[in-house]
Structure formats: C-alpha cells, structure tokens
Amino acid sequence: MPADNPDPRVRTFSPVCRAVALLLGPYAEVVLHDTATDRVLAIWNPMTPRAPGDPSMLGELDEVDPSAPDVYGPYEKALPDGRRLSSVSAVLRDDAGQPSAVLCVNLDRGPLEQAAALLAGFAAPSSPRPEPLFERDWTERMNDVIGGRVRAQGRPLERFTREDRLAVLRELDEAGVFAVRRAVPVVATALRISRSTAYSLLAELKHPAGP
Amino acid sequence: MPADNPDPRVRTFSPVCRAVALLLGPYAEVVLHDTATDRVLAIWNPMTPRAPGDPSMLGELDEVDPSAPDVYGPYEKALPDGRRLSSVSAVLRDDAGQPSAVLCVNLDRGPLEQAAALLAGFAAPSSPRPEPLFERDWTERMNDVIGGRVRAQGRPLERFTREDRLAVLRELDEAGVFAVRRAVPVVATALRISRSTAYSLLAELKHPAGP
DNA sequence: GAAGCCCTGGACGAAACGTCCGGACCGGAC
DNA sequence: GTCCGGTCCGGACGTTTCGTCCAGGGCTTC
C-alpha cells in the first residue's frame, strides 16, 4: 500500500519506515504525520487502531519554529491499555527546507523494562530515578489513570466494569482534567465509551443519588 | 554535521537516521550508503570505526534488480569482537524511482538476548507505580506571570505596554493555559483588558505578520 | 486639528458543551 | 422461549463558550 501511495512523502520515506517497523518487530509502530493537515499520512505496525486520514493529535510539536530542533525525544508516553512507550519524532523537510511531515517511532518499553529490572539485580547498581520536573500534559495523565486501572484490575479495556469506568472518571475529574477544553470526548474515546455515556457517568458522580 | 551536509540524500534522511540512532541508544548504528560509489555517506553512532568515505562492503545487496524488494532483513551479522547483530537495510530511491542510497540499521542483540534468556526462566512480576505530582493551578501560574512582568518592568498593571501584554499572553499560551475552558476571559480581566483585545493579541501571536 | 494606532463594547456565526430520548444489546428471572 | 431491568449507543437538541468582526472613542504624534 505505501509503495504505490500517491503522496510523494510516503513514497520517499516508506522504505525507512518499513525497515524500522520490521527491525523492532511487534513492539514498535511507525507513523508518518502530515504537518499541514495534522493527520496521519501512513502507519506501519499500528499499536492503536489508527489509519491514514485520522487526526494526528501531536499538538506538542511546535508548528513553525525554525529554531526548534528536527529530532525530539526520546520522551515517554502511555497508552490507555497500560503499555508504556518511548517515542522519538523527526521533522522531515522538503527540498525547499520547509517541514512537510513528521515521523514518529513509538516503542513499547514494557518487555525491555522488565528485562532491565531483572538485569539491574545482577549488573551494576544504577541510580534509582533521574526523573526531573518533566511536566506531563493531561492526556498523559489520562493514559496513566486508564492504564493503571487496567493493570490494577488485570482487566483489558474492553471488559471494563461500569465501576471501573466510574473510578477512572472520578480520578480524572478530581485531577481537574475536565476543565480542559475537548477533554470529555477524548477521554470517552480512550475509555471506549460514547460521549453520551461519558457525560452520563460524570453526572452520576456529581449527583450520587440524583433525582 | 549531517544537517548541513552538501549531499541532498543525507539532508533528506538524516533526521530519520538520527531519530533511530537516538531511540535505540548505544546498541544500534545507522549507516547511509552511496549505491553509486559503494561508500559510506554518513554514519550515526558507529559500532566500528567507520567514517564517511570508507568503502561500504555491502556486496550482499543486489545491485540493479528492479524486482528485488526495497527492504531486506532482519538478518544476522557478527562482529569480530563477538557481538551479534540484527540488521535491516532499506533501498532509498530518488524522485525518478532510481536507487540512490541504502540505509542500514545494525542492532546489537547481545543485551536483549541476555535479558530474554533470563526472563525465559522467570515469570514477569509487574512493578508498582509511583503517583505523579499535582499540577499547579493555572490561575496561580497566571498570577505569577503577570506579577513577574510587573516586577521585571517596574510598571504597574495599569500602565502596561502593548508588548508587556503580548509577552504575558505568549508565556501563558506556551504554558498551555488557554487550553483550559474559560481561561481567556479570566486572563483578560486579570490583565485589565477586554475580552476582544485578548483574542486580538492572541491572534497576533499566532499570525505574526498576518493580515 | 488631522491622522494613525489601539482599545472597547456589542454583535454574530461557529464550535463545544451538556442533556435528553428512542432503540439496541445483554444477562438473568420466569 | 419471553420478559425485564440495566446499560450503552447514536442522534438530536438547546445552551454556553469561543473566536471574529466592526463601529465607535480615547490617546498620542505630527
């Protein structure tokens, strides 16, 4: 599909993307974003059901800052299903030097983290956590809360109980996430419920024995 | 060095190469080969002391077979020092569709193999997670920014310059404050300007020389 | 005083918000 | 099987908020 894709950027970069996706096996996805429309151009080995044309949701990359670096990361991400990712992004430029696409590689760190934790017991004792004041945005918090619930209950997102969803929504509400614009639909999507249901559950939180 | 490399292929693909080299840390090298001269164009994170201009030694790739695939591997390689590598190669084509370069990613499998071997003997106990910090209220941030500007300029709020207001709005915008619902009117009030002016100044930030 | 710049209140369409309802679905009771 | 309570969904709807626009009016500059 990408090989005869009409978009020249996809034609140019698809070999690299396929190569990376192949090398990293089932634990990495490669995404090509269109900077102009902020949508997915192409995706290899998707970890979430995204497809070309879907919105990119990568507002974190500055739009038109010529002084910004071309390569970001690696930085941490979390998925609603509990997976934790390492991500890098590269700004790809056309012949004129203008940003035309963004390439993102998302690597599932779970297996590597487990291996690293075991190895840490035998190898040199490394420092505990150099994690600085890295401020995480609300979608990260959302993915943490949902992913935490998945892990805590040992239940995949598809078999969440009504109580699971209520608990997640309560935690996000107390964290003030719903003071952010457009937060409710995004959370609803991440929780695999409809917008209506999300508002319904939120109302239930506010009026426990409501009229 | 690769960013301002005179070779257009290096300029085109260096962000991807740097990104991959960064993501895979010290365990992978990324090499860009010139198919015409069979020499190294550029190399990131080299595992052996190769440099641009050195011969490529990749005779295994078929030269001019149009039916051959664009991506090879992963296949196994070994290094003189005993390291075992997983490699993939991608044929990169120019706008005319002619092969112009070959990208190789060489991943040291050693650490991963050790980890995998260890993990094979044990079950995977998941580790607990620390709870992240609480985000400071955005109104506090707003007051900080405005108050800081007052102190920095030694100018009371009523005599703020247009530039003062722009600076404050820019900082708040970069902090993501305006992603919060109802934030604009509140900030406008705090800045002693009208809602219209606030939106006008914000538009100016987004379209610096716009109409 | 005239010209230019900037802020303002008000108005307006567009977008997001929050609520409501009919219908589909599912598991349990009969 | 049929019924039934509970839950979710998609869609529709009215309301609120957003973001833009414009006709004034104050202020500085010439």
Image (spheres, coloured by chain):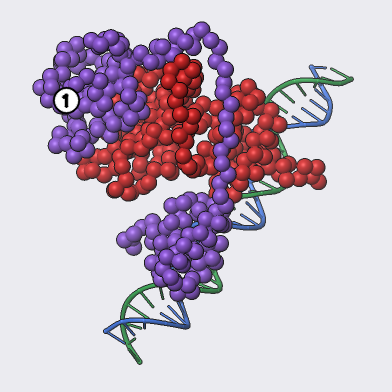
Chain colours: A red, B purple, C green, D blue
Q: How many marks?
A: 1
* Image height of A74 relative to B70, above or below: below
> Residue at horizontal 62%, vertical 40%?
A172
Q: Quadrant of the N terminus of chain A?
A: top left
Foreground pick, B78 / B201 = B78
> Residue at horizontal 53%, vertical 42%?
A138
Residue B154 pos. (x, y %): 43, 70
Foreground pick, B39 / B131 = B131
> Residue at horizontal 29%, vertical 48%?
A67
Q: Secondary structure at mark 1?
A: loop
Foreground pick, B126 / A172 = B126
Crowd around label 1: few <14 · some 14–19 · many ≥20 (10 Å): some
Residue B25 pos. (x, y %): 34, 26
Residue A10 pos. (x, y %): 31, 31
Residue B172 pos. (x, y %): 47, 56
Left or right side of A200 for A20: left
- Extreme residue toward the top, this view: B121
Residue A19: in sight, yes or no? Answer: no
Left or right side of D2 for D10: left
- Extreme residue toward the front, this view: A125
* Image height of A174 relative to B15, above or below: below
Which chain is mark 1 on? B
Left or right side of A35 for B200: right
Residue B208: in sight, yes or no? Answer: yes
Q: Amino acid at mark 1?
A: Ala
> Residue at horizontal 43%, vertical 43%?
A59
What residue is shown with label 1? B51
Left or right side of A88 for B130: right
